[in-house]
Image (cartoon, grey):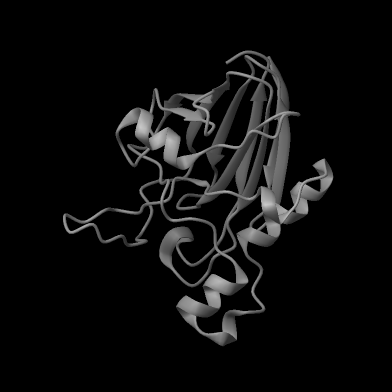
């Protein structure tokens, strides 16, 4: 049964509390859209830990069967299905500061994922200190043999999705990425769809 089905506008934030056993499906409606994502046990506040998640699964990418974990290795979410081969854990979230450093001072006024996260955090009594390294659904960040990273054209397409199951009561926070200075969104941010299912 679908509990909630919403379209997130380009550049916009979104959040929800998933009950244990509920599923969340994120759909890349128009294609090539990065969806920045954070997860927290709720109300404990135990945050998704990229370091622990990657160490436990021995891979820098997320795919079907990957488990998003806290720093204490407690499971938050399990990926139950994905239409793309992998999802990024290394590229981070754009911010006014990182945009300025990477792309020049003229970008400082551009809205960014860090601001989206802060807007949603405020609804739950959270703040900047609660922002940790995030997942980037659908974003393509290849790792070269020498360890170098690059943000390149996405590997998604219109209508492709990723689905996950909540292993505990979990707050999920989304920034439908506003970035226009690199190809993570095809230089044209677009919509995402969030579908919460009663059972994954």
* Left or right: 64, with 21 as reference point: left
Q: Position of residue 134 (x, y in %)?
A: 53, 47
- Residue 109 to residue 7: above or below: below
Front position in the image: 49 or 79: 49
Front position in the image: 128 or 193: 128
Pick out the residue farthest to the left: 145
Residue 87's quadrant in the figure? top left
Q: Position of residue 31 (x, y in %)?
A: 47, 49
Residue drawn at 73 percent across, 34 percent down: 16
Residue drawn at 42 percent across, 64 percent down: 183
- Residue 36 to residue 167: above or below: below
Residue drawn at 54 percent across, 23 percent down: 74
- Residue 199 to residue 83: above or below: above
Residue 148's quadrant in the figure? bottom left
Q: For the N terminus, give its image quadrant.
A: top right
Front position in the image: 146 or 108: 146
* Left or right: 43, with 170 as reference point: right
* Left or right: 75, with 151 as reference point: right
Q: For the C terminus, give its image quadrant.
A: top right
- Residue 150 to residue 17: above or below: below
Q: Position of residue 86 (x, y in %)?
A: 35, 39
Residue drawn at 61 percent across, 72 percent down: 96
Q: How many marks?
A: 0
Q: Position of residue 137 (x, y in %)?
A: 48, 43
């Amino acid at each position: 049964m679908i509990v909630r089905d919403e379209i997130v506008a380009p550049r916009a934030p979104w959040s929800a509390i998933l009950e244990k056993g509920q599923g969340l499906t994120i759909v890349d409606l128009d294609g090539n859209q990065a969806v920045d994502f954070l997860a927290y046990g709720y109300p404990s506040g135990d945050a998704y830990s990229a370091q622990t998640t990657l160490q436990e699964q021995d891979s820098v990418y997320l795919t079907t069967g990957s488990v998003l974990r806290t720093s204490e290795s407690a499971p938050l979410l399990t990926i139950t299905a994905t239409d793309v081969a992998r999802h990024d854990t290394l590229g981070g979230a754009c911010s006014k500061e990182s945009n300025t450093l990477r792309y020049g001072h003229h970008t400082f006024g551009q809205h960014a994922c860090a601001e989206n996260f802060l807007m949603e955090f405020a609804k739950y009594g959270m703040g900047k200190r609660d922002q940790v390294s995030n997942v980037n659904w659908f974003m393509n960040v290849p790792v070269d043999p020498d360890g170098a990273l690059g943000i390149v054209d996405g590997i998604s397409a219109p209508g492709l999705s990723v689905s996950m199951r909540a292993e505990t009561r979990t707050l999920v926070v989304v920034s439908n990425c506003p970035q226009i200075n690199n190809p993570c969104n095809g230089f044209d941010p677009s919509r995402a769809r969030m579908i919460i299912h009663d059972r994954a």
